[in-house]
Amino acid sequence: MVKLFGQKIKYRKGCSSIMKNKIYVNTKKEMFPVAEDLYGLFFEDINRAGDGGLYPEMIRNRSFEDSLVPAGCTTDEKQLIYINRGGWSGGFNHGEGMDDWAAAVPFTSIPGWYSENAVINLDKSDTLNDNRECSMKVEFEAGGKIWNIGYSGVPVKSGAEYNLYLFYKANKVCNLTVSLESEQGVVHGSDTKEILPDGSWQRLDYKLKANADDFKGRVVFKVDEPCEINFGFTSLMPEDTYMGHGLRKDLVEMLKNLHPKFMRFPGGCVVEGLSKETAMRFSDTIGPVWQRPSHQLMWHYRTTNGLGFHEYLQLCEDLNMEPMYVCNCGMSCQARNGEVFDMEETNNLVQDALNALEYALGAVDTEFGAMRAAAGHPEPFAMKYVEIGNENFGPEYNKRYEIFYKALKEAYPDIIYISNSHTEQENLPTEYVDEHYYNGPEYFLENDTKFDDYDREGPKIFIGEYAVNGGNTIASMECALAEAVFLTGIEKNQDIVKLSAYAPLFQNADYTTWKPNLIVFDNHQVYGIPSYHAIAMMAEYRGKTVIETSADVERRPPVYKGVPGVMCEKPGMQMKNARINGKAVDISRTVYGSFVKEDDIYTMKRGGNQHSFVGKSDTWNRAFEKFIRGHRWPGQSDERDFMWATFGTEDMEEYTFEIDLKFEQDNIVTLSSWNFHPKTDAGCNEPKDPDWNLRSVRNQIWKIEDGKGVIDRKHFFEFNKPEPEKTPLDIDYTKFNTYKIVANHFGYECYINDVLVQKKEHLLHPLIYQVASIEDENIYIKLINVGNEDIEVEVNLDCDIDSIVDVKTLSAELDEVNSMNHKLKVSPKESQITKGAKTFTFKAAKYSINVLNAKIVL
């Protein structure tokens, strides 16, 4: 494992472990203006963040379409999973979604809906409108009833009012009572309306007032005598929403407290879709909600698009955020063997994007501007940014990007357009580039200077998605600390990095498909993870101008633990005489492949440990395994080609590993150090291989390919990073050679037959990170202590300041997290320094993020 935050280790000769930590703030050296929109939001409908979340619909499956097979996909016989045309599988469970979601509720033929003395069935022959795929036909007995259980319950609060409407057709006159009830049938509020059978679809509206608090209730529909009713669409929403605009108040308040300057919407992978049919289209997200078609999201559930284009724009306006619209570029999700749409469909999507911009910006006498006005907003909305595609790349993307860019730029030249990859390298017009970073905490700590060397004449950078989603912990103080260090590096490069957004944003705790997420909620309460509070602090204190800072602080290397390993990509490699610190060792783990031993020589072969995915239904495991085995990720070979063995024990930090190897020149061989398998359950909540595998094991490598050595690798999304340097090696492939890695806290050295051929030096990490900005008489100093002890920091300014310095601090043990029971366990505390001066001392708590607000004395 990795321990990066201030471990006490042995120091090289000349390195002191005790020193005075000093930072210098030069208010007279202005670097550049702060990026006005640096901190923003990325919204994607993931973890049921839309329906039942930010869009507070209380009826689950209000359009009755959840159990319909997703367009462009097939299901297994029992409808446990769906599979797209590229072979990627997802949890379906007859429309309940993920396996654990389905297991949490009794089975029903129409997800979310149950009946007593009534029969419910889908009716595809009679629908409310052309965009609805079915209605729900109910054959009621006298006193019969149906009910909906909502999103892990229908939550009501005493005294609150709720608006329910439904569309129906009936075969006779009867009374339909709608009530809010407990699981035990206690009525919390009800209303009765008369049903009239005139052969057409009719709407009924109910006003319900709750007389009790109940977060696990249900909404019940009951008749007084036998009848048949087709329900075309239903909805139950709270009367009290944010600014009356239909969004959940407490969740919007959480967004507001992040001080966001923009919002990227509607995704994310949902923009790409599972298939051509499920790609996101603007045209599906406007108009009355009962007329908007639903569609399956790749996150294992269906949305009714109640949270649509207009609602996003209204939210941006309400929170004074710049909108950033992401349009589908004619491709579905490449990571899931997505499809490339033909040019006719691609051109249709270009027009769809143009229509979206007209809806946002057009005058009321334009087609889509008139639709916006009819929806209650005659004045144009804003639209500052448009992103063309999501996580798309390669020749097909480049071709489509150019088509979109030219058409959109000609029509709306003032909008800033964002590319998914560094298309400027293909001589395409590129204004902003979206880069994504998901990794362990060590990555973020090691990359605070990542943007220092970016070409200032190149495109601006948008960090569209980032989060610590692996390592020792997730959603913890450790993650917040590492991300804050990364953000200080971003703030020091605001001349090139203009936008950033943590991802994902929301997690419904009862419907999780990805973690970690910035804000966690259920149907009635919410909290922010430590990263939420860190980002809120960073975003609140922005200043107007970045000023020069420097530091003279203690530096320490990271401490890695793990075992050495040897991997090859073709069978036939021979190995013998493995030693750790001079002592003979045998294979401790066979990750892939198998070995035949003869006369103390191991020969690596295919076969043996095949690995399998577990934790979901057997059907999903098998389908997912088939997809993974047959899928080549960008820049990665097929796992089936690998043979991989490790040696020693996982608690080793510093060691010398030696082994004699003989292999053909065309066989790619990788020696690795500090192999370890994090235990965190992070990322996509899909079937996982619990054993060691290429995607789960973290390590550092020495790769030997065709007589050349490589000691670095590209991150998945680092499209602009040059290929790692390859060093020619002198290898006699006709005989055994001794390969040696000497690994210590400061890096590792690579030897062939005791000749040093390559080495990698670890960066020494400062225990204190800093960045500062100024606005009028206010100086904002952001100071982070990643060490495992309190540190006194001498702050040196070039001006006089007031003696009172306001301080906000976020500090906790690395593994501490927030939860529903302890929502603010890790949250900021305020204090003051009472002896502020041109030079003063600040005691930075261990593992802390601090903002110091000092006022210049003029």
Image (cartoon, rainbow, N blue to C red):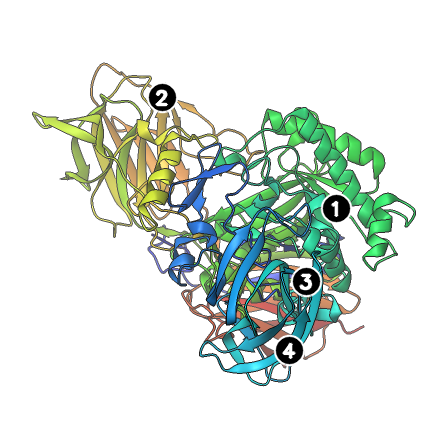
Viewer-nearest of discs 2 and 3:
3
Callout 2–callout 3 Cβ contact below 8 Å: no
User: The residue under label 4 is which amino acid type?
Assistant: Asp
Query: Where does the image place residue 680, in percent across and percent down from the top left?
Result: 37, 55
Q: Which residue is mark 4?
A: 191
Under circle 2, the secondary element is loop
Query: Where does the image place residue 814, in percent across and percent down from the top left?
Result: 42, 65
Give me the C-alpha separation between circle 1 and circle 3.
50 Å
Tell me which label, 1 or 3, sits earlier in the chain. 3
Q: Quadrant of the C terminus?
A: bottom right
Viewer-nearest of discs 1 and 4:
4
User: Where, by quadrant of the figure, is residue 605 drawn?
Assistant: top left
Under circle 3, the secondary element is loop
Give me the C-alpha separation between circle 2 and circle 4.
82 Å
Viewer-nearest of discs 2 and 1:
1
Q: Is residue 181 visible?
A: yes
User: The residue under label 2 is which amino acid type?
Assistant: Leu
Residue 331 placement, left or right of 802: left
Q: Which residue is mark 1?
A: 385
Q: Which residue is mark 3?
A: 197
Q: Which residue is mark 2?
A: 729
